[in-house]
Image (spheres, rainbow, N blue to C red):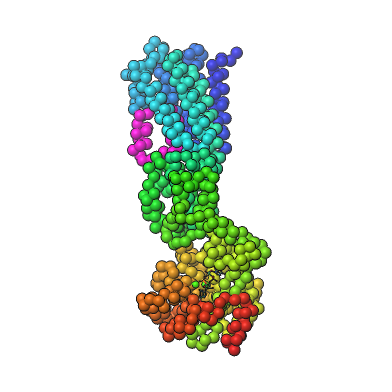
């Protein structure tokens, strides 16, 4: 009959093999704690193999010398200590981000293990931890140090895990308690019986608990970033918000993530996101970080986290000043940071998600690298309106409710209509008129802009097809391209497609671009614009005077016309400096053979002055508001004939 002890060890070994199989094939995860877990598994396999040897020796199944017994003991003590150390390391990495800690701390962590191992390895001569005499192994005088060290590692990990329990998901807290219970059993049994029977049987239980924990924890982890995911966030919020000790929740969004996702090579976007996750981990000190997908991160800050907002934001700013790499090109990224103050109870369990959604839906208002918004500066109404507009956009797309209006652009020399700007209109049956200034940014956020722009391109091209622009005395029609459209890698093909569809001359269409488009990959933008120009289109630079408007940079783009924004046009009539600025701008742009349009011309005085300054074209309510195409055609005919 097969020996019971051997059978027992073989059973445990086979369970370990199953664990190894499972951990290697189940999830393709590169998480650091998984590596450590694998380390524990292999150490355990070696340990039980060594046990088999020990049992065989005990029962005289094999003949052995004293050196063999010593080697068996040495390997055994070495491995048990290694497993305890790895166990602690595993917990630290799983709960905190120990592998990001400084080298000093890591060295301190391992040095205890190392010191005891030195004692252990020299034991055959010094008899410190153990020794073998007359074919029997005995504990040395310093044996307690080995036990103590194991205990310290186990205790450290357990206490740390219990401290951080609240930040972790529920199952994790429970499994840690289970592990602690087994640790107590092991120690008590050892103290009473001075042997390690319990240790051998509970070790395998611990290993299985670890495996279950990892598998469960991974339901709550984002696989790209290894951060906790939205599910874990919900669990935390439901359990903790409103309780004292919590300070703030940060929502951090990568602006234009949607654009990157839709237009760039996915694996490289993932690399970028992973990089960002690393920065967040590093910069957020010890607070817990979540990744919600779509370029959105969450950070929960608790009082005892010693999190300093200014330091955090400064470090982010420092990083975001420098472009990121994407597909070998460099791209400037910007962040939106919403801070929800959860200290005073204004934001509580009941309304947390509404506030959170408001933050998430807020439109971006600045071009700063890091735009920060605080929960006390906005209300629920803003959320409601944002959502309503998103719905209105959906409806308008489904029911073809968008419409194009045209606003004439007049030559100051001849007083004739030389072109028109096509402007989109949305009149929703529930919300009434919604300004494009409101819904275009929303559609850029949620990606609907590309569908809207299909509509715009189609109607403007059809307008050009159906009306003989040249015969009406006009050069072209101006069509707005949003920043995101400019970076749409299919834009050139799309335009080509519509040229063929309506069989029109691209010279009859001028594309208005804005400087915000240059926030993206400038190199690619330039290439794309040149490709489009080759098709025959011309460009205008819109909203000049609202951004950082750098003259030299503007000239790097193939634009023929500069449109002075209405804000600087109006300013010229209220303050002297702006007047001089406009005057100089006009002459400078003329020197480099660019034409100028002044927007927002609302009265005769403005028109006359701009004409005197040499501005080539004017556009504004003084002539006509944007109007439906039939009204526009009538207007143009009446002026031009
Ligand atoms: P924009 O490109 O700067 O368009 C000029 C805006 O100034 C238009 O506002 C026009 O109605 C307004 N405007 C023109 N003359 C005057 C004036 O004398 N006084 C005043 N107060 N305003 C004047 P609108 O139509 O509300 O469009 C706002 C913005 O929405 C546009 O600014 C543009 O950025 C965007 N947009 C409009 N249509 C489209 C479109 O088809 N595609 C894209 N991508 N964006 C569009
Ligand atoms: Ca425009
Ligand atoms: Ca403009």
In the picture, measured across the screen, residue 549 lies left or right of residue 17, that is left
Residue at far right of view: 399
Instruction: Name the spot of residue 39 as percent of width and height, x first.
Output: 47, 32
Instruction: Name the spot of residue 384 as percent of width and height, x first.
Output: 56, 56
Q: Which residues are magenta?
A: 84-113
Identify the image quadrant of residue 609: bottom left
Instruction: Name the spot of residue 595 as percent of width and height, x first.
Output: 46, 80
Residue at far left of view: 126
Specify whether residue 599 is painted magenta: no
Q: How many marks?
A: 0
Residue 233 drawn above or below residue 528: above
Residue at far top of view: 134
194 or 121: nearer the viewer: 194
Can residue 110 be seen in this snapshot? yes
Identify the image quadrant of residue 12: top right
Q: Quadrant of the C terminus?
A: bottom right
Please, what is the dominant secondary structure of the magenta stretch?
helix
Residue 640 drawn above or below residue 310: below
Residue at far bottom of view: 641
């Amino acid at each position: 009959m097969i020996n019971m002890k051997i059978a027992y060890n073989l059973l445990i070994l086979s369970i370990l093999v199953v664990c190894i199989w499972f951990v290697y094939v189940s999830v393709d995860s590169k998480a650091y704690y998984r590596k450590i877990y694998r380390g524990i598994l292999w150490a355990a396999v070696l340990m039980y193999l060594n046990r088999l040897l020990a049992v065989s020796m005990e029962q005289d199944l094999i003949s052995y010398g004293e050196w063999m017994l010593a080697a068996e003991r040495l390997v055994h003590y070495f491995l048990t200590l290694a497993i305890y150390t790895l166990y602690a390391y595993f917990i630290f990495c799983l709960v905190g981000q120990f592998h990001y800690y400084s080298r000093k701390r890591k060295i301190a962590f391992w040095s205890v293990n190392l010191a005891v191992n030195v004692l252990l390895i020299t034991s055959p001569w010094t008899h410190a931890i153990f020794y073998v005499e007359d074919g029997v192994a005995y504990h040395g005088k310093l044996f307690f140090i080995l036990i103590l060290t194991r205990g310290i590692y186990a205790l450290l990990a357990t206490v740390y895990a219990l401290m951080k329990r609240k930040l972790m998901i529920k199952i994790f807290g429970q499994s840690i308690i289970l592990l602690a219970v087994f640790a107590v059993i092991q120690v008590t049994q050892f103290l009473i019986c001075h042997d390690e029977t319990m240790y051998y049987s509970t070790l395998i239980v611990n290993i299985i608990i670890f495996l279950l924990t990892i598998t469960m924890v991974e339901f709550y982890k984002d696989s790209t970033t290894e951060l906790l995911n939205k599910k874990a966030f919900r669990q935390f919020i439901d359990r903790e918000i409103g309780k004292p000790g919590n300070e703030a929740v940060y929502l951090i969004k990568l602006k234009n993530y949607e654009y990157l996702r839709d237009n760039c090579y996915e694996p490289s976007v993932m690399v970028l996101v992973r990089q960002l996750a690393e920065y967040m981990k590093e910069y957020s000190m010890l607070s817990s970080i979540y990744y919600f997908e779509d370029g959105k991160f969450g950070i929960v800050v608790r009082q005892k986290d010693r999190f300093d907002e200014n330091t955090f934001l400064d470090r982010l700013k420092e990083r975001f000043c420098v472009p990121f790499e994407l597909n070998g090109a460099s791209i400037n990224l910007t962040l939106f940071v919403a801070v929800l103050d959860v200290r005073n109870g204004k934001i509580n369990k009941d309304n947390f998600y509404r506030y959170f959604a408001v933050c998430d839906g807020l439109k971006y208002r600045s071009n700063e690298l890091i735009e920060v918004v605080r929960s006390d500066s906005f209300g629920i109404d803003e959320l409601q309106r944002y959502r309503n507009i998103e719905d209105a956009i959906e409806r308008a797309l489904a029911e073809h409710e968008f419409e194009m209006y045209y606003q004439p652009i007049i030559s100051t020399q001849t007083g004739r209509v030389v072109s028109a700007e096509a402007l989109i209109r949305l009149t929703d049956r529930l919300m009434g008129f919604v300004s494009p200034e409101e819904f275009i940014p929303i559609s850029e956020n949620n990606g609907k802009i590309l569908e809207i722009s299909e509509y715009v391109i189609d109607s403007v091209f059809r307008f050009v097809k159906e009306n003989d622009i040249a015969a009406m005395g006009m050069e072209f029609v101006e069509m707005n391209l949003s920043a995101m459209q400019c970076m749409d890698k299919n834009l050139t093909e799309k335009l080509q497609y519509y040229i063929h569809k309506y069989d029109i001359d691209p010279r009859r269409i001028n594309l208005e671009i804005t400087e915000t488009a240059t926030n993206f990959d400038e190199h690619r933008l330039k290439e794309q614009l040149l490709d489009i120009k080759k098709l025959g289109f011309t460009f205008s630079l819109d909203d000049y005077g609202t951004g950082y408007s750098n003259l030299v940079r503007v000239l790097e783009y193939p634009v023929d016309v500069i449109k002075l924004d209405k804000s600087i046009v109006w300013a010229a009539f209220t303050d002297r400096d702006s007047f001089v600025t406009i005057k100089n701008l006009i002459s400078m742009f003329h020197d480099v053979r660019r034409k100028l349009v002044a927007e927002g011309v609302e009265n005769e005085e403005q028109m006359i002055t701009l004409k005197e300054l040499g501005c080539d074209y004017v556009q504004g309510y003084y002539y006509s508001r944007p109007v439906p195409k039939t009204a526009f055609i009538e207007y143009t005919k009446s002026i031009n004939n």
